Image (tube, rainbow, N blue to C red):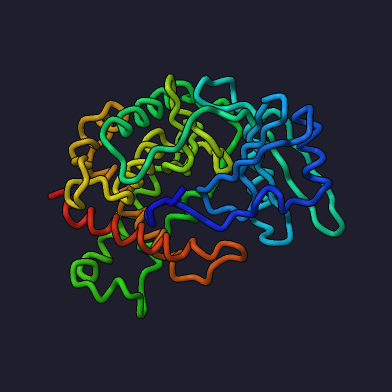
Amino acid sequence: MNLPATYAVGVRRPYLDLPAEVRAWVDRTLGEPVAEVADKQGGFSPGVAAVVTGAGGRSLFIKAVGSAVNPDAIRMYREEQQHSARLPEIDSVPRTVATAEIEVGDEQYAVSALPAIDAAPPPHPWNLADANRAFDTIAELGDRLTPSPWPEESTDDLPRFFLGWRDLGGDDPWLADPWIAERAARFAALEADTVAQMAGDTLSHTDLRADNLLFGTDRVWVVDWAAAQNAARWIDPALLLGDLVVSRADVGDGGEIDVARFAIEHPALRDVPFALNWAGVLCLAAALHRFSLRPAPPGLPTIRPWQARCADTMIAWCRRTEPA
């Protein structure tokens, strides 16, 4: 499957390249030897993502990563395992079947088995029907996860991530754009104000994109909760709004969705002032721009160009839709 450049796509390891010890654990968890493998794309992890099927027809979705390529990747897999185990029972969130830590020589592997769901991520660019289904699901999750089932949790991950405008300076290429240069100081102040409004009591995914959603016939599944944390309820809808823009679904990019109107009218978004949702996209654009200028992390060769494309597309939308 060829995915567009707007999609988050890294370089994943094929399932059959996993060490024999890891594949043996999968066989045991499946209850029979793996007879068929379908490697999956999407997301930036250098690990394995594959649906495996036994001769008897049982299937599982397997995620696995080793510590050698990128230590942050295995940390995130472990956090996803921990978060998934703590999430309440929710129809739109798959439950983990089994997890394991497997030592192979000097390398550690984190492995998860999840249900193999008959569903697929929505395509880019987003269409209006898919967008409505996704945001309906996010609204339902907001109802279910407010107040947070993890009230004791606190995090400063979001303030650390959203530092793009306040870190903009020097010879940053964005400052060559007069529209950005004349607004940079105001956007830095707006970023600080927006970040101050990100704290809240909703257990939030905080990494919502098309590749973390699976569309089935009867529901939308929300997957990969590695970055789950308590935040303001508007955060998840605003982040997914950014993915609509990134996908070039907006009418200004030739798509079929008037994203600004969608932000005003959809129930998941309309109770929040458009200016705040707009500011969320503006802050996400600058954060991704900031990261795009750094060297690529080990095993993630595609992430910096993707971040740059996302940032440029979002800042163009913000330019077109800037509130008066």
Q: Residue at x 30, y 62 (%)?
A: 312
Residue 74, percent across and down? 68, 51
Residue ID at (67%, 32%):
53
Q: x, y (%) of residue 44?
A: 54, 54
Residue 294 lies, with reference to residue 4, above or below; the image says: below
- Residue found at the far bottom of this picture: 171
Would residue 85 appear left or right of 237 to someone viewing this image? right
Establish if 102 lies above or below 87: below
Q: Is residue 262 shown left or right of residue 101?
A: left
Q: For this rendering, which residue is in front, 158 or 132?
A: 132
Q: Is residue 86 visible?
A: no
Residue shown at 46%/35% (left/top)?
A: 120
State the image coordinates of residue 272 (x, y, percent, origin top left): 28, 34
Residue 194 appears anywhere in the view = yes
Quarter location, residue 200:
top left
In-front residue for pair 38/190: 38
